[in-house]
Amino acid sequence: MRETNEKQAQILDLLRNMGYYAWRQNSGKINIGKRWINLGNEGLSDIVGFHRLTGRMLAIECKQARERITDAQREFLDTVELAGGIALIAYNVADIAESLAAIARQEKHERRGKCAAQSE
């Protein structure tokens, strides 16, 4: 658990440096007395947020090396992607940095293409 919390903290720092507003999203259930309290919807990603300039949503599910995502987690990530957001699974911080940098490069390339088409 400690390793997961450290990874999430490192990812949140990375996201802040890349222009995202993101937070750790607790989900699951807790038992208080004889009552179970739901914390968020089932499958909700560990980290959610959006890019401060583009508004594009971001969802990151953090996993250890051999862990797999649940069907509910996959459904949530798929929903984020279908809505135009970024959905990632984090096995390590470097992969997230690389994926987000590649997405940023692609978005920059697409913006350049739109500007060139408009100037013609």
Image: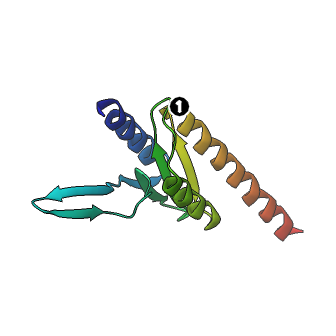
Quadrant placement of the C terminus: bottom right
Q: Position of residue 13 (x, y in %)?
A: 39, 41
115 up-or-down from 30: above or below: below
Task: Describe the element under mark 1 as helix, strand or loop.
Answer: helix
Query: Who is closer to the viewer here, 21 or 65?
Result: 65
Q: What scheme was used to colour the molecule? A: rainbow
Name the residue located 53 percent from the left edge and 43 percent from the top edge. 89
Screen quadrant of the N terminus? top left
Residue 77 rendering spot, x and y as whole percentages: 55, 56
Q: Which quadrant holds residue 117?
A: bottom right
Residue 16 in the image: x percent, y percent?
A: 42, 47
Q: Residue furthest front?
A: 34
Q: Quadrant of residue 75?
A: bottom right
Residue at the spot 53% in from the left edge and 31% down from the top edge: 94
In this rendering, would 44 be left or right of 87? left
Q: Residue furthest right?
A: 120
Identity of the amino acid at label 1? Ala
Number of numbered callouts drawn:
1
Residue positioned 55% across, 54% down in the render:
74
Residue 36, given in percent of the width and then of the height, sits at 21, 62
Is residue 63 rendered to the left or right of residue 26?
right
Determine crowd level at label 1: few under 14, some 14-19, many 20+ residues with C-alpha closer than 10 A.
few
Q: Residue furthest left?
A: 33
* Residue on which the image places disc 1: 94
Q: Is residue 10 above or below residue 19?
A: above
Q: Residue at x 13, y 59 (%)?
A: 32
